[in-house]
Every structure is written in structure tokens, then in C-alpha cells.
Image (cartoon, grey):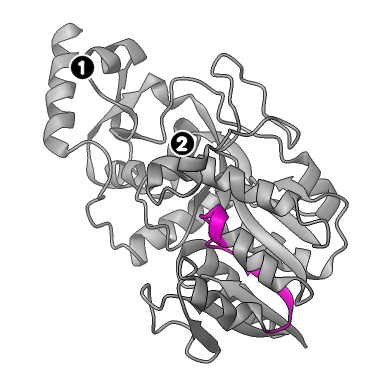
Amino acid sequence: MKKVLVLGGTQFVGRTIVEQLIESDQYQITLFNRGKSNPALFSEIEHIKGDRLEEQDLEKYTKQKWDVIIDASGYWPDSLEKSLHQLKGNVGKYIYISTCSHYVFDEDSSTPLTEEAEIVVCTTEQSVHRGYETYNERKAECERVLYKQKWLDYIIFRSGLIIGEHDPTDRLYYWFYKLQTQKEILWPNNGVNLLSYSNVKDLAALVLLAIEKQHSYSIYNASSLNASLADFMNEAKNMINKKPNLINASPAFLEENNVNQWTDMPLWLNGNFLTVDNNRVIKDFDFEMTSLNKTTKQLIAYYSYGLNWRAPRYGLSKERELELLNILKTMV
């Protein structure tokens, strides 16, 4: 039975990976994390408590031998480099969860990017920064750290915008909640702009396949589908039998009224540039991604029974949305 270490493992992506590992019943699983997020989860498997940013804690796992390490919490290139130096000779395969958001996107292009596209530069200052604003740069630098390990059998899965059960961000949920609870919705650019999404269960399934499968490449875009907010809305409104009035707000209107892309209008960007090509991973792993229809069903089930349609913690306030809707109505 292979020894598998999961770095992280109790939040969202890592949690889903561990659930699938346990369900497979094929591996001896150990988790390494700080024990702060959902510490009671997975009591049936071994936990090593430690902080990746504390150098003395790294030896708690780097001095042991592992058939596979799954890195679901690799955000800091300096820590990653130190741990890999200590792991040399002690790990068979290293599976790293990265992101597609670190590509250098051309906002004037709608062509999905392949794995050969350029990723962002990371300065020395950014590489040791601990805040979210340098996330993309640090993830890109973590990949470069892996590139340098000529001795290491590694595989990098670059995820799209990850969605699914236990998503802590409320970004896509914002729109499903409005569909469920409102008769009118402020709708950015008719909801037509595309993003690449990764169904968290697809991502976890690919990780499990990578444990056993010989792979032809070291880097894969692990997105499930390219979809718009309108695509999700059209699927969902039929499933929950809701037909709200979608009040279109043009990009110009939103800009004039200081409504920010992505934060005020979750998952909306004025363009189709944040998309990637997933053909490589589908072909190499002979993998069928979860469809938009099935993904939407999974999301509605989680939002209904996991979140119980509580108010979202992301996006415009209801009061601000109502104010903007009233302005639009006076313009008609």
C-alpha cells in the first residue's frame, strides 16, 4: 500500500482529495497541516501538526519516506524550496496544485491559453510576501522551484476557478443565491463573459489518477469547462424553477458607477480572456470532465443542504444593488 502525504487536506481542494483517497481504500494516508481548519476532520487517518513556514516543522515530514506527496497548500516558494531540498531521496512523486490565474493573459484575446503560455514574473519581494495580493506571482514561482528539481518526478495541475462543495469563497454562490431569493438581479453585460472553471471533484479525481498513471507531461491545465454566468444561470433557473428579471448593466454603466469587476460583481470580468485549453489533460488521462449540467446540479445540492441558502459573504450589498437597479430603471 502506497504511503501518501497530503500537505493541507482539511479545506476545499485538499479536503476533496482526501475524501476520494479514503473512498478508494488503496493508500496509507497522512496529513500535514497546522491543525487550525476543521481539525476534527479525518480522525481515522494520521495527522502531523506543523507549519510550512516554520523551518523546524518541515523535518516532521521531510525526513520520512513517501511514495507520493500531494501539495494542496503550496503558496510560498521559499518554504517549498527548503522542503524539496530536505525531501531529496524521500519522495517518489510530487503532485502540485497550481492555478491558471498566473498566466500572462491578453485582455484583447479570447483564445484559450495552452500550457506553453507565459506565466507571471515574481520578484524577490513578492516571493516572500504573505498576503493574497501576490498569490499569482508566488504560485508561478513555486512552479519554477519545481522546474529546477531535475531529480524529482513531479506533476503540476493548473486549476481554473475551482467550484464545488466546501468552496469558502461564495463567489459563484452569490449568483445562485440571488436566483433563489430575488425577483430582480443586477446582471453584468448580460452574463456572457467566459471563465475557465474546475469542478473540485474533477480536480481531485485527476490527482488520484496521477498517483498511478505515467504521464506524458509535467504541466496540465486542469480546468473542467469554459462557461459564462449566463450558462450557469440558464441551467440553474430550470432546476429550481426560478425566473427572475435579469436587469442588464453594461460595462460602461458599471464603470461609471464605480462597480468593480470580480469583487463587486463576483466572477465577472469585461472580456473572455481568462480561459484556458484543457485538451492535454483530457487526452493524456483519458478523462471525461463533469458537464455544466451535472456541475450545476452538484452546486445546487450543496447550496441547498450545505449552505441552506444563507446570505453570501461576497459581492455587492443588497442595498447597493437596489440603488443601481433603480438608476437603471430611470434610464429606460
Outermost residue to the bottom: 44
Asked if the stretch drawn in magenta spans residue 271, the answer is no
Outermost residue to the top: 331
- The answer to which of 277 and 103 lies nearer the viewer is 103
Q: Which residues are magenta?
A: 64-79
Asked if the stretch drawn in magenta spans residue 68, the answer is yes
- Residue 225 figure quarter: top right
Q: Residue at x 32, y 44 (%)?
A: 174
Q: Residue at x 50, y 58 (%)?
A: 298
* Residue at the disc numbered 1: 257
Could one spot residue 117 in this view of the protein?
yes
Q: What's the mark number on residue 234?
A: 2
x then y, percent, for residue 144: 68, 46
- The answer to which of 313 and 37 lies nearer the viewer is 37
Question: Please, is residue 119 above or below residue 85 in the view?
Answer: above
Mark 1 or 2: the one toward you: 1
Q: Residue at x 74, y 49 (%)?
A: 147
Position of the N terminus, as image quadrant, is bottom right
Q: Residue at x 67, y 51 (%)?
A: 145
Question: Please, is residue 327 above or below residue 140 in the view?
Answer: above
x then y, percent, for residue 139: 56, 47
Question: Please, is residue 198 above or below residue 4 in the view?
Answer: above
- Residue 303 figure quarter: bottom left
x then y, percent, for residue 24: 69, 80
User: Is 248 positioned to the left or the right of 302 in the image?
Assistant: left
User: Is 78 positioned to the left or the right of 205 in the image?
Assistant: left
Position of the C terminus, as image quadrant, is top left
